[in-house]
Image (tube, rainbow, N blue to C red):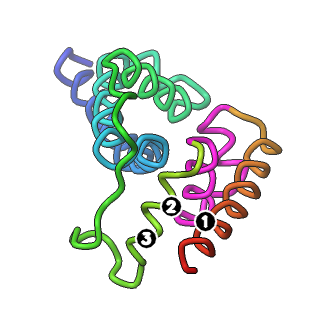
Amino acid sequence: MGVRADESLRAERFEAFVRDEGLRLRRALIARYGVEQGTEVAADALRYAWEHWDRLSTMANPVGYLYRVGQSASRRERRWRREVSFPSRDTSYVDSSVDGELFDVLARLTAAQRESVLLVHAYGWSYEQVAEVLGIRVTAVRNHVHRGTAKLRRLLDDDAR
């Protein structure tokens, strides 16, 4: 194969990875950092993936690895100082049946609780999938989901009064 054919094959494989796994990565990082920052660090992680595709394509858990690349990008650029932001009620991509108050309450959970609750309940991931991407044990995911949903209930009940 020629150099152009190799490069074309490399690009095709990377595009398939982004198509198949890019959404999982974005969802995990948005659950951690909010919409604005999560989207930015996901783009940083995917740029890193392209630059290091030869090594990354052979990994057993490339999404988990890129999740940590996104975390590093966030810390490196000191973006972590921003508050977690979720879409407001008037954002076109938010389901109109979702109460905007839910986003405010989600921001009050710990990062681990918010990630786990959103990935399991909003996106339908299994505990095992969440654990794999976040690099934690399944029991930790269960704890975060349990504590996070309990706190959500409490906060939503308090706000309803």
Mark 2 to mark 3 CA distance (whole Å): 6 Å
Q: Is residue 142 left or right of residue 130?
A: right
Q: Is residue 114 magenta?
A: yes
Binning the other alpha carbons within 10 Å of mark 1 as few (below 14), some (14 to 19) or many (20 upward) gives some
- Picture layout, residue 45 above or below residue 139: above
Which mark, residue 77? none
Instruction: Assess whether mark 1 and mark 2 are in contact (beta carbons under 8 angstroms).
Output: yes
- Picture layout, residue 91 above or below residue 18: below
> Mark 2 sits on what residue?
105
Instruction: Assess whether mark 3 and mark 2 are in contact (beta carbons under 8 angstroms).
Output: yes
Residue type pointed to by label 2 = Val
Q: Horizontal and vertical percent for residue 54?
A: 40, 17
> Mark 3 sits on what residue?
101
Q: Is residue 57 left or right of residue 161?
A: left
User: Which type of secondary structure does the marked residue at label 1 adopt?
Assistant: helix
Name the quarter where the N terminus is drawn. Answer: top left
Q: Horizontal and vertical percent for residue 80?
A: 39, 28
Residue at 55% across, 58% down: 118
